[in-house]
Amino acid sequence: MTGTTVTQATDPAADAASLLNLIAGGAMTQIVHAVAALNIADHLAGEPRTAKEVAAREGSNERTTFRLMRAAASLGLLSYEGEGRFGLTGMGGLLRSDTPVSLRPMALVQAAPSHWQPWGLFPEAVRKGESQAGKALGADIFDYYARPENAEMARIFSEAMGGMSAMVTQGVVAGADLEGVSTVVDVGGADGHLVLALMEARPELRGQVLDLPHAVEGAVEEAARRGLSDRFSGAAGDFFAEVPTADLHVLKTVLHDWDDDRALRILRNCRAAAGEGGRALVVEMVLAEVGTSDFATISDMAMLCVTGGVERDLDEFDALFAAAGWSRGRTYPVGGGHFGMELRAV
Ligand SMILES: C[S@@+](CC[C@H](N)C(=O)[O-])C[C@H]1O[C@@H](n2cnc3c(N)ncnc32)[C@H](O)[C@@H]1O
């Protein structure tokens, strides 16, 4: 909803440098991927180390580990401390596996076949107006994750969603109106980070994650890890078929995975489960004015290519909400470019 107006460079050399930087974007994705996959941030967590020390810990090639770490320093992920030693910057620290807001799983997912292969066909997604997951993976992304041979990647995807949730959790917990709410369903909740954070803040809340059978197990485990099993349950199901009843339905970055028809089905199923006086909380990025620098427009391209979904502006959200029997009330930023949108059944 907010954004800064894009300024145009006029110096041709600066334009070329900027464009080359964009052209190398895929290489940067893979550099971040390799830093995550080779656990470089974990190896540097205690103290700065040389590439030789990191390579010995990781069992990787010393020379190419050095070249990767040099590139990572050039991108601001690592600091160079002299005498061959590299340390972690704040940004690089987010790739540690043991940090509360770890973006390591996200770095692994974005460069994994599930995302990388559809991206390889991206111009076709624009030309045809459809996701390329079917062509690249032989299935839509969530069916791909449901295959037994992709179970490990599906687990990392859910973890990645958890890392992204951590960026907004505080804002949602602080902003959400939970007056009169005693049951919450996190619809398509993956590992359940959002509903579990609400439950931690409100000891009277009972929570549930509705997700596909392969994904819901992670939520049950996460609830147990946080000591919340007595107030939590996992519901393996399909939100296009039915959504469990609750005082509040939470939908975080679920609607953006789907086109309008399918997003509408999810919202209608929530509305049916909510009944009179029902409430929902939608957490999504909201597109800003055209022509502003807006990360939601980049995410929109990922949705087009990988899931077949779409990022929306407020008018587009409101049209969907109204068609599904919801009315939007308070809307507030929750962090990471996301907004909380409170809905009431009409
Ligand atoms: C983009 S993720 C969002 C996860 C979580 N809400 C978050 O923001 O961290 C979308 C979630 O929807 C789930 N999902 C996809 N299709 C579904 C379906 N038909 N029924 C229930 N869940 C589904 C996926 O497994 C995934 O966990």
Image: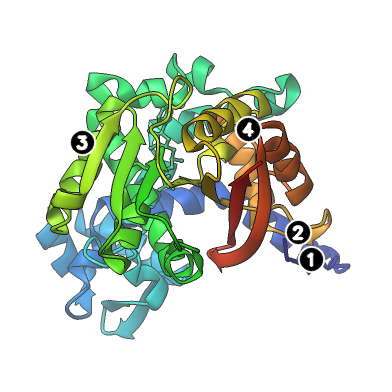
**Which residue has dot 2 on it?**
16
Quadrant position of the C terminus in the picture: top right
Mark closest to the chain's N terminus, 3 or 4: 3
Q: CA distance from mark 2 to mark 3?
A: 49 Å
In the structure shown, which secondary structural element does the residue marked by tag 4 occupy?
A: helix
Contact check, label 2 and label 4, Cβ < 8 Å: no
Q: CA distance from mark 2 to mark 4?
A: 28 Å
**In the depicted structure, whether residue 275 falls above or below residue 31:** above
Query: Left or right of 13: which side holds 257?
Result: left
| Image point (42%, 56%), residue name | 164
Which residue is at the front of the view, 283 or 88?
283
Which residue is at the front of the view, 1 or 247?
247
Q: CA distance from mark 1 to mark 3?
A: 53 Å
- State which image quarter holds ligand 1: top left
Contact check, label 1 and label 4, Cβ < 8 Å: no
**Which residue has dot 4 on it?**
304
- Camera-side mark, 1 or 3: 3
Label drawn at residue 217: 3
Mark closest to the chain's N terminus, 2 or 3: 2
Q: CA distance from mark 1 to mark 2?
A: 5 Å
- Kind of residue sitting beneath label 2: Ala
Give neighbour class at mark 4: few <14, some 14-19, many 20+ (Cα, 10 Å).
Answer: many
